[in-house]
Image (cartoon, helix red, strand yellow):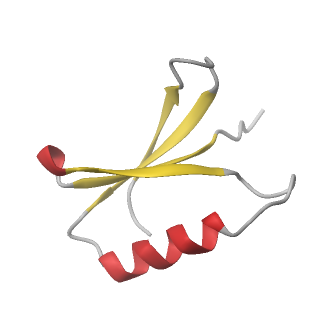
Amino acid sequence: SYGSVWQGQHKKTDAVVAIKRVPIENDLEELVKEIEHMKGLDSPYIVHYYGSYFRDNERELWIIMEMVSAK
C-alpha cells in the first residue's frame, strides 16, 4: 500500500525499526489484508512484522517492521 517509511528506534531494546506511515484515506481493506499477511510470515528471509498502531490525531496507520538496510 502507499505511504512513507521512516526509521525509528525501540526505546526498551534500542532496535532500529522501519515505520510505514499510511494515510487512512487509502483502502483500509487492503491495509488489513497486508497486515494479516505479514503476521503469518515467519522466515529469516522475509521482513519481520512487529505491530501496527492507529494514530487518530494524524489519520495514519503506522506499521512497525524490521529495518532492512540497503548497505
Q: Residue at x 70, y 41 (%)?
A: 68
Question: Is 39 left, or right, of 28 in this rendering?
Answer: right
Q: Give the x, y percent position of residue 57.
A: 12, 45
Looking at the image, residue 44 lies above or below residue 31: above
Closer to the camera, 70 or 50? Answer: 50
| The residue positioned farthest toward the left in the image shown | 57
Q: Residue at x 79, y 61 (%)?
A: 42
Where, quadrant-wise, is the C terminus in this rendering? top right
Looking at the image, residue 46 lies above or below residue 25: above
Q: Residue at x 54, y 25 (%)?
A: 10
Q: Residue at x 55, y 73 (%)?
A: 36
Q: Tally the numbered discs.
A: 0
Question: Is 62 left, or right, of 46 in this rendering?
Answer: left
Q: Give the x, y percent position of residue 65.
A: 59, 47
Question: Is 53 left, or right, of 17 in this rendering?
Answer: left
Where, quadrant-wise, is the N terminus in this rendering? bottom left
Q: Which quadrant would residue 30 be assigned to in this image?
A: bottom left
Q: Which quadrant would residue 31 be assigned to in this image?
A: bottom left
Q: Give the x, y percent position of residue 60.
A: 26, 54
